[in-house]
């Protein structure tokens, strides 16, 4: 006999992992270093996995399982990275979320350091 069951916490964690890159895009901007974005993605994957595992343990009345937490954290991070590079970035969804909330950024994709008065003086212009 074969059964096919998906625990609710696993389905929730998968959905969260798929959406994590978009969340990172919402709370950062184009000027945020890619290393910081990667660290934030890893932190969110670990925290969301921990909360999901904690909820599952509390609902089942069982002890918190560190092994399952580590396993789901690694899986969530791998899923989030794959979603970012496989779907969200090629489709332009990541870029649109980075532009969200800044009308100047949305209108001018080249907006950033070096625009206007933010440009450093030319080295050759020193006395």
Image: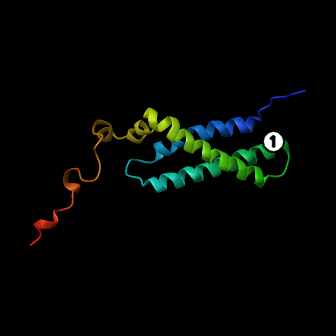
> Residue 124 versus residue 17: which sits nearer the camera?
124
Task: Kindly give the residue lying farthest to the left in the view shown.
Answer: 127
Q: Which residue is mark 1?
A: 59
- Residue found at x 55% / y 49%: 41
Q: Position of residue 83 (x, y in %)?
A: 55, 39
Instruction: Tell me what residue is drawn at x 59 percent, y 53 percent.
Output: 43
Residue 69 vertical placement versus 83 (above, below): below
Asked whether 62 or 89 is in front, the reply is 89
In the drawing, does residue 126 fall left or right of residue 90? left
Within 10 Å of disc 1 (Cα), the crowding (few <14, some 14-19, many 20+) is few
- Horizontal side of 124 relative to 77 (left or right) equals left
- Residue 22 appears in view: no
Q: Can residue 52 be seen by looking at this rendering? A: yes
At x 41% / y 39%, what residue is drawn? Answer: 95
Image quadrant holding the C terminus, namely bottom left
Pick out the residue farthest to the bottom: 127
Q: Does residue 102 sit above or below 67 in this rendering?
A: above
Q: How many marks?
A: 1
């Amino acid at each position: 006999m074969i059964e096919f069951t998906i625990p609710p916490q696993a389905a929730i964690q998968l959905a969260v992992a798929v959406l994590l890159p978009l969340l990172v895009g919402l709370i950062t901007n184009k000027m945020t270093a890619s290393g910081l974005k990667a660290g934030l993605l890893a932190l969110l994957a670990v925290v969301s996995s921990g909360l999901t595992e904690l909820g599952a343990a509390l609902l089942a009345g069982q002890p918190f399982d560190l092994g399952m937490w580590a396993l789901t954290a690694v899986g969530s991070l791998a899923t989030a990275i794959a979603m970012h590079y496989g779907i969200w970035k090629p489709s332009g969804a990541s870029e649109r979320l980075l532009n969200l909330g800044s009308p100047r950024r949305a209108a001018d994709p080249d907006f950033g350091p070096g625009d206007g008065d933010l440009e450093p003086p030319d080295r050759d212009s020193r006395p």
